[in-house]
Image (spheres, helix red, strand yellow):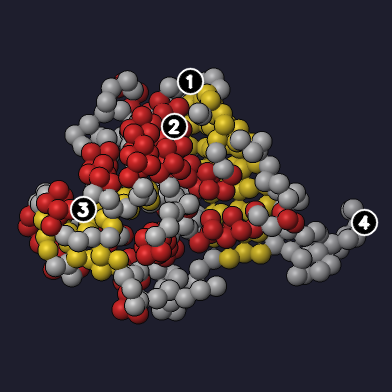
Amino acid sequence: MYNIKFNYEYDRKIRVGFIGCGAHAFRNVYPTFDYAPIDLVAVCDLNAERAEIYRKRFGADKAYTSHLEMLKKEQLDAVFVVLNFDQNGHPLYPKIVPDILAAGLPVWIEKPVAYTAEEAERLLELEDKSGQFVLVANKRYFYPTFEKARQILDRPEFGESVSINGRYPLTLSPFQPEINTRTSLHWFLDICHPMSGIHYLMGDVKEMCFIEHQPSGNVQTLLKFKSGAIGSLQLSSTQAETSPLERFEVIGDKQNVVIDNAMRLIYYKGKKGSGEYGKAPIYIGDDPADGPVLWEPEYSLGQIYNKNLLLQGMVQSVNYFASHVLEGKKITRSTLKDSLHLTRIFDAYKKRSDQWITIE
């Protein structure tokens, strides 16, 4: 266990520039700097008025409308980039990140990293040549529930993780008439959400296949992992809006881990009572300590652990990035290589094939 420091408690901080002054960044990224070793020195947006608003609101020294000018004039240790999509519905990061890497700076960017695996591969090549690193903020690599689940899966008593089942509301249907055009599958890029969680828990996918139900647009995906494990992902586009958004369950050796609604973690272990079948009077095990465990946040107290910025791993992601910049070390989690794997899975869905597809 460790404590989060407030920004003013850090003796050393990294000087950062921030490209993008949008609503998502306002809600979910800029505020994380209150809990990280970061000195925000400059912001950049094509809209000069908005850039100035963000400069004043978050305490930066300068505001720019050109990221190239900011990179040239400011002495930075790293850059954050949070952008929307272009007119074709494609992520803008492949157009911006090369300039930052060429300036010799590490980058923290939002997901999805790219529309095609080829774009992600080119970024990976540039990252290798630059000697820097790119963190792609797929949150499930940093959710407290996913981190704890990963620790449980690594315990010897859990055994081999043999299978995973997931559920998340996405659909291919809205894009069927234009499946082969540049504007297709914009919204389906959110496949990085459930697949990043599955990837963090189970490792690389080796093969996948999927079938669709029409007209609902629900999709069932079967997965084979390089580890030998198997799994499935249900894209339940017609689920109730009032239901928990997502659910994942990993099965080991007589033990299970469930992440429900992203915030509730259940660890199933132990045995029921030892009575004879059909005659056991109670269902609780002989040793109450050797039974299921459930964790979920409480919201009664003014703790930071029940803030959305920490529940969704945003603060943890930013701190992880900043600490590696300070230490001069490359990251090993939520990497550009991880995002390349997720983008290859996205490309596989584009094929709309009911045959097994190999993920290179």
Q: How many marks are shown on the rendered structure?
A: 4
Q: Amino acid at mark 2?
A: Arg
Q: Earlier in the sequence, mark 1 or mark 2?
A: 2
Q: Give the residue pinned by disc 4.
A: 276
Disc 3 to disc 1, C-alpha distance: 38 Å
Q: Give the residue pinned by disc 2.
A: 344
Q: Give the residue pinned by disc 3.
A: 19
Dot 3, crowdedness within 10 Å: few (<14), some or many (≥20)?
many
Q: Amino acid at mark 4?
A: Glu
Name the quadrant containing residue 152.
bottom right
For numbered disc 1, what is the local secondary structure? loop
Q: Give the residue pinned by disc 1.
A: 353
Q: Which residue occupies 19% across, 65% down?
A: 41
| Residue 217 in view here | no
Q: Earlier in the sequence, mark 1 or mark 4?
A: 4
Q: Position of residue 245 (x, y in %)?
A: 46, 49
Q: Earlier in the sequence, mark 3 or mark 1?
A: 3
Q: Amino acid at mark 3?
A: Ile
